[in-house]
Image (spheres, rainbow, N blue to C red):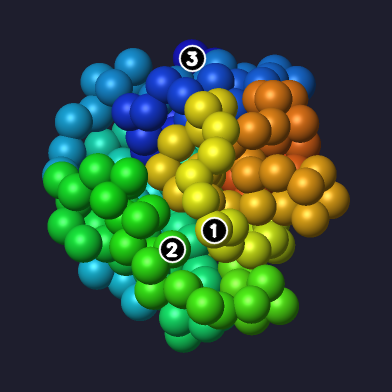
Amino acid sequence: MSRRIIFATGNEGKMREIRMILGDLDLQVLSMKEAGIDIDIVEDGTTFEENALIKARAVAACAGRDDIVLADDSGLEIDYLNGEPGIYSARYMGEDTSYRIKNANLIGRLEGVPKAKRTARFVCAIAAVLPEAAEGIVVRGVIEGYIGWEEKGTNGFGYDTIFYVDEYGCSTAELDSETKNSISHRGNALRLMKERLAGIL
């Protein structure tokens, strides 16, 4: 049986980006669901890297012996708010709270704060578990920007509408998919992981 990459997500938008970037590794790329893996994973790490490894190891325990399992953990760090929401980005203000409410809350907490102090970044850690690397491989991708004063754009999700990039003068939700993938934290991390995997496969 040929080797497969199983990515620990059920998010189809994320899978599109993953397949686009990892496509030339010449391996089948599947989501957890497509691989028939359905487990609940408790992410109790203290860093993005720890959480990504926890997810990858949990899925690897259910996968085939030769499968390569990838998992990511990502979030938004706002310097003025001491790195919040950080690893709690998805659970910030409660998992069922809409991002419109979360984003409004963050903008409210930055009221009166000048642009120079609104610096922020999206962080993505990706972990790989495979037989050739006993301890696993972990990489980190980052995109630097700042928090805007209002939500803008529709081509994104989560905090994209309030995260602005100076280079393009707009929010990441206003970028087209190709441009966003070329500079995004997940895109950067996936490209780093692809280099690492290509070197050992």
Find residue 100 and report its image quarter. top left
The answer to whether one can see residue 119 in this image is yes
Q: Is residue 182 above or below residue 186?
A: above
Which residue is label 2 attached to? 107
Distance in Å between CA atoms under marks 2 and 3: 51 Å
Residue 53: mark in rendering: none
The image shows residue 172 at horizontal and vertical percentages of 63, 41
The image shows residue 137 at horizontal and vertical percentages of 58, 58
Residue 149: mark in rendering: 1
Question: Reading the chain from its start, which is encountered first: label 1 or label 2?
Answer: 2
Kindly state the secondary structure of the residue where label 2 is placed: helix
Distance in Å between CA atoms under marks 3 and 1: 52 Å
Q: Amino acid at mark 1?
A: Trp
Label 3, residues with CA under 10 Å away: few <14, some 14-19, many ≥20: few
Question: Reading the chain from its start, which is encountered first: label 2 or label 3?
Answer: 3
Tell me, yes or no, whether the two marked residues, 3 and 1, touch with CB atoms within 8 Å.
Answer: no
Question: Reading the chain from its start, which is encountered first: label 3 or label 1?
Answer: 3
Question: Which is more toward the observer, 121 or 49?
Answer: 121
